[in-house]
Amino acid sequence: MTANRPRRAVWSIRWIVACAAVVLTTLIVLGVTAVMESRTRNVLAREIESRLMLQARNLALTSSGAIVTDYPELTLAPLARVMQASQPELALVVVLDRLGNIQGHPDVRLLGTPFVPPPGLTAVPTTAPQGPHETITGNAQILVASAPILNVHGELLGTALVGLSRAYVDQAMGQIRRQQYLILGAFLLAGAALSFALMSILLRPIGALRAGIERIGRGDLSTPLRLADRTEFGLLAEEVNGMAVALRQAQTEMVERERLAREMELAQQIQRSILPSGQTVAGEFVVHGGHWAAAEVGGDYYDVIPQPDGSIALAVADVSGKGLAGCLITAMIFSLLRALRSFHHSPAELLAVLDERLGETLQRGSFVTMFYGELDSKSGRLVYSSAGHNPTLVYRGATRRVEWHRSKGIPLGAIRGGAIRRTLEDSAVDLGPGDVLIQFTDGINETTDPSGKEQFGFERMEKIVSEAAPSGAREIVGRLHDAVAKWRGDALPMDDETMLVVSREGAARAGRGDSSRGGTVLGLGEALQRLDAARKQGTSIQLPASLDSLVAIREWLDRSGALRGLSSNGADMLDLVLYEVCANVVEHGYGKDAARTFELWWLPSSEPAGGPAPRGSFLVRDQGRPFRPDRTKDTDYEDPLVRKRGRGFGLDIIHKTMSGVAYHPETKLGNITVLDWDPSKLEQRDEARHG
């Protein structure tokens, strides 16, 4: 994919940095030149002004003796003419007497006439030294220096004026500027060339670094980046090579992790396949279990095996250690148990044979604790044997007491050579109506609190089992698992947790579905048929597992036609019932996890209705945690405590409104709730109540 990606234009950093260095060098040279030119102009101007003033002083000194003679012009006129001839840049050479008349001038025609200064002369700011009565003035064409002519007594005899043409000054300035520009150009070219060459050489390793990184981007991690450079680029090249090596190692590790993850996934599938799915019902007995691995897979195992004669074989095992090794051993136990069970009707004898077979493969130090028993569903007698496993908890429904049945057997594989046969024995326990038997692994009772100081223990198990036993095997498993998880807190489980519950619940409660009080028991097969028919002929809505989403039920009922012909009170009652059913799924099944969803279906009945409103069935299908939506007896509304409680009447509303309610947990399609709806019966109840 990377190789086919269009390549965008890239500016070379070597050229960018080199050009930036040239531009920066040029700016620096130009800046320095501008400053130097300004200083040179100032120095040159000061020098010219000082020379001009010096000439004016020399002229004044020379004229001091001639100006007091009777004919000063005879001396001063030739002097002015010689000065101007020898210095063509002088635009003005004049000697004035004290009255301002010209006594010396290159043009003899102006001798004796009043001096008319050039127009627009103004004082020129200068740093050249000036004496008393000395001035420097000028305009755009001329620069004039004036010096007084004094006698030996310091008396003013006249003034000497020397003027310099501005064109001469500009010419001198231009000549100096051209020289500076030539020097600037030479230095600039040399500096730019040197900067470009230096930056290009210093940044040359970038090309090699770029090529190496591009190779890594294309997946070539085996070709090292070779760069003989002692600057930071060399260190960067070494880091890039180290990164390529690390990436190559990471690729290898990733492939290995993917392989291990795939193997772990297969192990999870194997473990799921050998554990029972859902509950098992035999006569008045309901058998339900649960397994929660501490790692991806666990070393705990339980099994429920229905026998042809109606009895049930029960097994719970705990392998020393957990994870993949424990999972493999549980798979061995599963296979051996299925293969050897029919040949040994004594639980103790079967465990002894398992010890012999496992001893051939288990490593020294590995062992398995195991409980195995066979339950006669007709008489309620359980014959069992335990190889070093946890004691068996038995709750007596008649007395509401808890019993613990312990054994002296040693674990499978703990001691080789058949020593286990001297410790194993068959025991029996009779389970009457309402009795519950629980077998579990030590991951339950040995779970510690977050501090790690106190275990969950047997006493807490007794209390929870005593409270949940009247509600059946499924409720015991759920309550006990929740209590252990709450006791552990946010800490990770340290061991696998497994439990197996056998409950003698009676024929009505052991049916395949939980039905409404006074209604017809709806079997699982018929419930699945109705769900299939609803998918083909009915209408549905998919709801997120949040209470806020349940407000959409009323609008869906209007669209589906289920409210057609119903009174306002009947529509409100039907909406309330469906809300209560779905709220139970949201709260108890999904724990208000809005990321998950469930389905609500409406299947109109093909039979004619007894009134204008249609009959039919509502079905709820969810994949949440199973729960028991029934009660063993009606709520006594005459009880003041019940009225004071003010809540918990949803199940009564559901059962009193619907003509039939059936709940089938953990089917191959999930948990299925079937609600039979007959609006004519609701109207009869309303008439009876108002009559």
Image: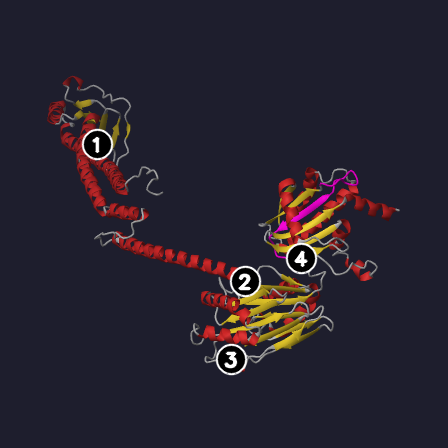
**Rendered location of residue 682, percent (x, y):** 79, 46
Please state which of residues 657 and 341 is positioned toward the viewer in this rendering.
Answer: 341
**Rendered location of residue 228, percent (x, y):** 21, 53
Q: Secondary structure at mark 2?
A: loop
What is the tally of numbered marks visible in this picture? Answer: 4
Q: Which mark is residue 147?
A: 1
**Rendered location of residue 301, percent (x, y):** 53, 67
Between the C-alphas of marks 2 and 1, the distance is: 125 Å
Q: Quadrant of residue 444?
A: bottom right
Q: Which residue is mark 4?
A: 512
The answer to whether residue 364 is magenta is no
Query: What's the magenta region?
Result: 606-627
Disc nearest the viewer among 3 and 2: 3
Q: Which residue is mark 3?
A: 420
Q: Earlier in the sequence, mark 4 or mark 3?
A: 3
Q: Which residue is mark 2?
A: 275
| Amino acid at circle 3 | Ile
**Residue drawn at x 59%, y 77% as measured from the top left:** 426
Q: Earlier in the sequence, mark 4 or mark 2?
A: 2
Between the C-alphas of marks 3 and 1, the distance is: 139 Å
Residue 43 vs 623, above or below: the answer is: above
| Amino acid at circle 4 | Arg
The answer to whether residue 612 is magenta is yes
Q: Earlier in the sequence, mark 1 or mark 4?
A: 1
Left or right: 657 in relation to 499: right
Please state which of residues 160 and 112 is positioned toward the viewer in this rendering.
Answer: 160
